[in-house]
Every structure is written in C-alpha cells, then in structure tokens.
Amino acid sequence: MTSQEKSEGCQQSAEAEKQLRSYSYTNWADKIQEQYGKIKENAETYPYVWGSYIVVYGGFGLWFAYRWRKLRKTENRVRVLQERLRKLVEAEDSTSSSSAGTSKAPPSSDISTK
C-alpha cells in the first residue's frame, strides 16, 4: 500500500465516523423538513380546511385565554378582600382585648331565672 492509499483510507474512516456522529442530527433534521413539506403541501391543497381549523381552534384559544384572565382577576380581588378582612379582624381583636383588659363589663341584670 502506498502512503496515498493509507491517507485516503484514514480520510474515509474519519468521514464515516463524522457521519455516524451527526447521523442522528441530520436524520431528525431531514424528518422535520420532510414533515414540514407535507404539511405545507396539504395546506396549499386544502386551504379552506386549514382556515376552518385556525378559526375554530383559534376561537377556543381566545375564549380560554379570556376565561383564564378573568379567573386570575377574580382570584386577585378575593385575595385583596381576604387581606382587608384579616386586618379588620386583627384590629377588632386588638381593640377588644385592650378594652377587656382595662374594664370588665358588668353582668346583665335583665336575665331572669325561672
């Protein structure tokens, strides 16, 4: 064997190894491009079908987004109201405890025993 044949053999084996390493990437890229081509061809062949899909599923998407946003706003309002109620209860407890500690209420005289 000559040195040229050896170098060609090494180059071929190096290229084969490189192809094996990048095989999975090119395979996936080729599959994605092939699938994209099929979808594009189908969309060009049946534009009204794809248009109806876009209208229907786009409408559902908009409706879900609207309901999601409304739910989030309602939850925020409830949180604010709960926080205000908690502060009111704390203030009431602190005032009632301070007033109860300073003076006790006299017992009620309108209670009759039978």
Image (cartoon, helix red, strand yellow):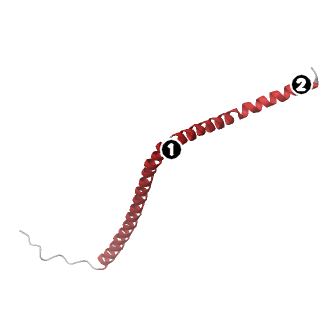
Q: Which residue is mark 2?
A: 6
Q: Is residue 94 above or below residue 21?
A: below
> What type is the residue that disc 1 sits on?
Pro
Q: Nearer the viewer, residue 113 or 75?
A: 75
**32 with respect to 109 (left or right):** right
Callout 2: SS: helix
Q: Nearer the viewer, residue 5 or 86?
A: 5
Q: Which residue is mark 1?
A: 47
**53 with respect to 97 (left or right):** right
Q: Position of residue 70 (x, y in %)?
A: 40, 60
**7 with respect to 83 (left or right):** right
- The image quadrant where one finds the N terminus is top right
Disc 1/disc 2 C-alpha distance (Å): 57 Å
Q: Position of residue 63 (x, y in %)?
A: 41, 54
Q: Quadrant of residue 87?
A: bottom left
Q: Quadrant of residue 29?
A: top right
Callout 1: SS: helix
Tell me which residue sits at (42%, 57%) in the image. Answer: 66
Q: Position of residue 72 (x, y in %)?
A: 42, 59
Q: Is residue 83 above or below residue 12?
A: below
- The image quadrant where one finds the C terminus is bottom left
User: Can you tell which mark lies on residue 12?
Assistant: none
> What type is the residue that disc 2 sits on?
Lys
| Residue sticking out furthest to the bottom | 103
**1 with respect to 93 (left or right):** right
Q: Is residue 73 above or below residue 104?
A: above
Q: Nearer the viewer, residue 43 or 23?
A: 43
Q: Position of residue 39 (x, y in %)?
A: 56, 39
Q: Which mark is first along the chain, 2 or 1?
A: 2
Using a 10 Å C-alpha cutoff, classify the residue at mark 1 as few (fewer than 14 neighbours), some (14 to 19) or many (20 or more): few
